[in-house]
Amino acid sequence: MPLSLNYLLKRLLWSAAVLVGVAVFSYVVIILSPGDPAAKWAGNPRGPGAAKAVEEARKELGLDLPLHLQVLNFLRMVFTGNLGYSIAYRQPVFAVLARNLAATLELLFAAYLIGVPLGSLLGVAASLRRGGSVDGFLQTLGLALASTPSFWLGMAVFSALFSAGFSAYGRVSTGLALATGFQAITGFYLLDSLLQLNIPVFVDALARLLPPALAVAAYPTGLCLRLSRALVADALLEEYVRAAVAWGVKRRVVVWKYAFRAALPGLVQVAGTAFAYSLIDAMVVEYVFGREGLGRLLFDAIAFSDFKLAIGLLVLVAAFYLAVNTLADVAQALVDPRVKL
Amino acid sequence: MSAIRARFNSAAGFLDLAKRAWKKSARFRAGTLLVGIMVSIAVLGPHLAPYPLDGWGVVPRNAAERAGKPPCPEFPFGTDSLGRDVLSRVLVGARLALVQIALVVSVSLALGLLVGACAAYYKGPVEALLNYVSEIFLALPAMVIALALRLALGQGLHVVVVSLILSWWPWYARSSYVYARAVVEMEYVLLARLAGVPGRTVLFRHVLANVLPPVLVQAITDLGSVLLEASAINFLGLGLPPDAPDWGIIVQNGFRYIVSMPWISMFPGVFILATALGFSLVGDSLREEMDPKMRRRWKLWF
C-alpha cells in the first residue's frame, strides 16, 4: 500500500484549512453585501413594526455581533455540520444540500462512466494512427467536444428527443413513482429502485438520466481523448515498447498492457480534477432538464435571497473539490508504482 | 509539461513561433481563421447587423407580427419570441463576448504571474501564504462565486468578470509558480543577485520574463474555456441582465421556446462553440510547436 497515515492526516488538515478560508470568504462576501441580509431574512417588512422586525432578525442571525465573532460563530457551525436554516425550503441547509447532492452525483457518475472510457478508447485509436488523417480528425473532435457549451448541448439533446416523442424532463415520472410505491432511500434513484426491485422506475429513471449524462459527458470525452492520445503516443515511442515488440508480444497486449498502462496515472489525475469541476456542468444541465439537484438550489437561493443556502452551496462545492482531489491523488498513487504518498 | 521551454522572449519571438505554427499546422490556420472572423464581427458587429436596435435588445414596435419567425431571407437566423432579429442579436453580441474574456484572462494572467513569481522568488512565509490563498480560490468554481456576488451585488457585467477572475487567477499562479521555481535556481538569477541588482528588478526582468511564454500560450487556450464559463453564468441569469446582447443570454431567451422556436438558441450556441474551438485550436497548436516532444510526427512503426 503506497499510502501512509501521515500523508492522509496532513491532507486532511490542509483541506480543513482551505475550507476555513472558503467559509470566511463566502460569509464575508454575502454578509457584507450592500443589501441588508437581516431585512431580507425578515422578508423586507414595511410599516410601523418594520424597524423592530429587522432588529429582531439581526439578533436572530447574530449579525449584531462584531464581524470577527460572527465569522468564528459561523466556522463553529460549519465544522459541526450545522449550516443554519434555509428560508426557501424551511429545512436545515445541511439536509437540503445532502438530498440534492445525491441527485447531482448520480448524473455526474453516469456522465463520467460514459465519457472517460469512450474518450480514452478514441484517444488510443488516434495515437495508433499518429500523424494520419484519422488522428487529425479525432484530435479536432476532442477539441470540439471540450469546447461545446454543455447547457446548449443539453438543450439540443432535449429538443431532439422531445420531437422524437420522448420527454426527458425531471428525474422520474411522478405518476409512475406514486403508482409503484417508489421511495427514495439514498437519493440515488437507480440504486433505490434496484433495492426495492422496482424495475419500471429503474428503467424510467435510467431513460431520463442518459440524455443529460450525454450532455455532461462531452467535456470528459474530449479531455480524455486528447490526453490519452498524447500520453499513449509518447509511451509508444519508449524503449520498453520497442523491446516488447522485438520479443514478439502481440500488438493488442503491447498497446493496452504496456503503452496504455503507462498513460493511466496521468489520465486518472486529470480526470479526477475534471470530475470536481464538472459538478458545475452537471448543475447547469440539471436546470435545462428540469431535474432536482444542486442546480435548482442555485435558483432557489437567488429567488428567495436565501443567503444561508448560498453559503452552504459554496462550502459544499469547495469541500467536494477538496475531497475529489484527495481521492484522485490516492488513486494515482495506487496505479502508479513510482508515486508514494 | 516540463518539456516546454521558453522559446520566445519577445513579441518578435512570439510572431516567429506563430509563423512556424502557421506553416506547419492546418489546425492552427483553421483556428486563426475562426478567431479572425469573430474579432472582425466584434469590431464591425453593430454596423453589419441588419437591425442594430434589435441587436442591443430593444423590442421592436411591430413585435407581435415579427415574433417567432423561422429563418427566412428577411431574418436569416429567424426572430425571437419578442420579435427581435436573432442575427442582429448574435452579431452585436460578439463584442461583449470578446470584451468579457479579454478582461478576465488579462487581469487573471497578470495577477497569477505576479503571485506565482513572488511565491517562488521570496519563499518562506510569503510562499506559504500565497499558495494557501490560491488553493482557496482553486476550490471555488466561477459559477458559485457568481452566485455569491449575484446575491450581494445584483446583476451586471461586474458579477461575471469578477467571479471569473477570482476563479481563474490561481491557475496562472500555480503554473507560473512551477516554472518560476525552476527559473529562480538558474545561474543568471543568482549572478544578478550577487551583482547587487535589487530584488524587484530581478523578479520582473529575469524571473517573470522567462515564466511568461508558456503561461501566455496556456492563456490563449483558456480564452475559449472562459467564454464557455461566462456564457453558462449568463445563461443561468447570474451575470448580465436578461436583454443584454450576450450569447449566453440569447440562448436563455430561447430556452422556453426550445421546441417551438429552436433557432433562437441554436445560432448563438454555434457562435460560442466556434469561438471557443478557434481559441483552443490556436493555443493547442502553439503549445505543440513550443514543445519539442510533441512536435515529433513520425508514424507508428509496428
Image (cartoon, rainbow, N blue to C red):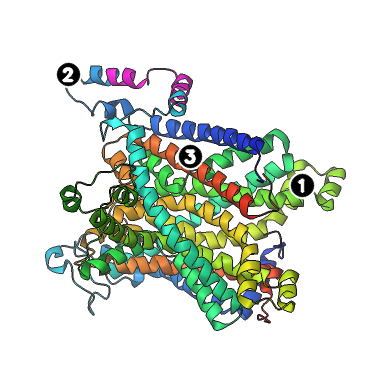
- Amino acid type at image mark 3: Ala
- Residue B110 shows up from this direction: no
Q: Do the residues labelled 3 and 2 touch (CB within 8 Å)?
A: no
Q: Residue A150 carries which label?
A: none
Could you tell me residue B163's position as x and y percent?
45, 46
Q: Quadrant of residue A132?
A: bottom right
Q: Is the magenta stretch mostly helix, strand or loop?
A: helix
Label 3 vs label 1, nearer the camera: 3
- Mark 3 falls within which chain? A
Q: Is residue A29 left or right of residue B78?
A: right
The C terminus of chain B - image quarter: bottom right
Could you tell me residue B104's position as x and y percent?
49, 52
Q: Residue A319 carries which label?
A: 3
- Considering only order in the chain, which callout, 2 or 3, is on the residue closer to the N terminus? 2
Secondary structure under the numbered disc 1 in the rendered image: helix
Could you tell me residue B14's position as x and y percent?
66, 67
Q: Residue A48 carries which label?
A: 2
- Mark 2 falls within which chain? A
Question: Is residue B115 placed above or below A55 in the rendered structure?
Answer: below
CA distance for labels 3 and 2: 44 Å
- Mark 1 falls within which chain? B
